[in-house]
Image (cartoon, helix red, strand yellow):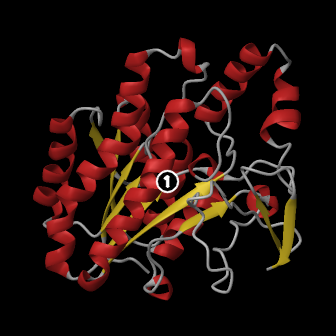
């Protein structure tokens, strides 16, 4: 139970953010629900018994005001869930520069700022839980989503850094990486992808969004809320710095990174004086070496 815990959830008016706020409220936490959509936010907060905060988190002053508002109202901050996000689907050569700036500000800079501003309260308490909503696109890439993929990859890097710095302070920081969750954001993505690829919306779901997943269904938002609840529980107090895929098996088929060269090989993967340039890859547990000066190759067991 999270009785007496104080949480901030961004993007809480709908979708994953709403599901996270709902899960925390069900566990007894007081939740400040932040969003830019004032009308929807106030209705959602009323339903959950949360405290609404209307703000644009691409603005530094609004990030500061959100934390100050929460601390002044409750006297402490225990949980931060950075969920707010947007998407823009467009080829790189046509991608609007202002859209890039907006997405990076909302989905990477704002989580940093909110973490920075909440950190002293968590440090003083000797307890804190930071949950960053990354994405499957924090682990892999898809075309036409350069800003979103960049922000989500960056968020995982920031998560790991915060985990390392917070470990001795009782602060954990983890990222959740869902595949497609049927939310208003994803509904917009479906329409945008259909336009970009020139295919019907049902084909976007079956042939693009879920083509790489073993489980052919969208992730329920309530499942993400339940995972956040677990990561805030005592049972998860040794879990920090992870990027947890909730992807229906999407990443299960990714190749493993190749191992470093075996010590007995004794050669750095750099060209030597004779122009020999060894490089390696994992293939059936064998390491292949290619010579820049010869078309022949030799094979050694790894």
Left or right: residue 22 compared with residue 200:
left
Q: Residue at x 88, y 27 (%)?
A: 203
Residue 29 in the image: above or below residue 14: below
Left or right: residue 191 compared with residue 16:
right
Mark 1, Cα crowd under 10 Å, few <14 / some 14-19 / many 20+, is many
**Which of 290/280 is in front?**
290
Which quadrant of the figure contains the N terminus?
bottom left
Residue 251 in the image: above or below residue 18: below
Which quadrant of the figure contains the C terminus?
bottom right
**Which of 185/145 is in front?**
145
Evaluate whether residue 195 shows in this view.
Answer: yes
Quadrant of the rendered structure where residue 74 is?
Answer: bottom left
Q: Residue at x 39, y 46 (%)?
A: 45
Q: Residue at x 14, y 59 (%)?
A: 71
Circle 1 sits on which residue? 133
Name the outermost residue toward the front. Answer: 274
Residue 149: x %, y % from top left: 55, 40
Q: Secondary structure at mark 1?
A: strand
Q: Residue at x 43, y 58 (%)?
A: 157
Residue 171: x %, y % from top left: 30, 76
**Which of 100/295 is in front?**
295
Residue 267: x %, y % from top left: 61, 73
């Amino acid at each position: 139970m999270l009785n007496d815990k104080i949480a901030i959830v961004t993007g809480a008016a709908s979708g994953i953010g709403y599901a996270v706020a709902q899960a925390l409220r069900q566990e007894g936490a007081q939740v400040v629900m932040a969003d830019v959509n004032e009308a929807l936010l106030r209705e959602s907060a009323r339903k959950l018994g949360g405290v609404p905060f209307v703000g644009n988190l691409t603005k530094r002053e609004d990030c500061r005001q959100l934390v100050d508002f929460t601390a002044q109202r409750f006297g402490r901050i225990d949980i931060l869930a950075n969920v707010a996000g947007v998407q823009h689907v467009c080829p790189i050569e046509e991608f609007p520069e202002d859209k890039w700036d907006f997405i990076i500000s909302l989905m990477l800079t704002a989580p940093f700022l909110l973490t920075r501003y909440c950190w002293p309260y968590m440090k003083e308490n000797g307890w804190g839980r930071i949950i960053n909503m990354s994405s499957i696109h924090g682990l892999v890439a898809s075309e036409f989503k350069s800003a979103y993929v960049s922000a989500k990859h960056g968020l995982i890097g920031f998560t790991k850094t915060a985990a390392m710095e917070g470990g001795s302070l009782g602060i954990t920081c983890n990222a959740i990486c869902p595949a497609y969750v049927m939310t208003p954001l994803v509904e917009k993505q479906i329409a945008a992808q259909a336009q970009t690829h020139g295919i019907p919306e049902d084909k976007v779901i079956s042939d693009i969004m879920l083509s790489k997943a073993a489980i052919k269904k969208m992730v329920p938002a309530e499942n993400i809320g339940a995972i956040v609840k677990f990561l805030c529980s005592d049972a998860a107090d040794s879990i920090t710095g992870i990027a947890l895929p909730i992807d229906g098996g999407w990443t299960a088929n990714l190749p493993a990174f190749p191992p470093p060269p075996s010590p007995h090989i004794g050669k750095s993967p750099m060209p030597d004086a004779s122009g020999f340039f060894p490089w390696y890859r994992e293939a059936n547990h064998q390491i292949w070496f290619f010579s820049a000066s010869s078309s022949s190759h030799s094979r050694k067991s790894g």
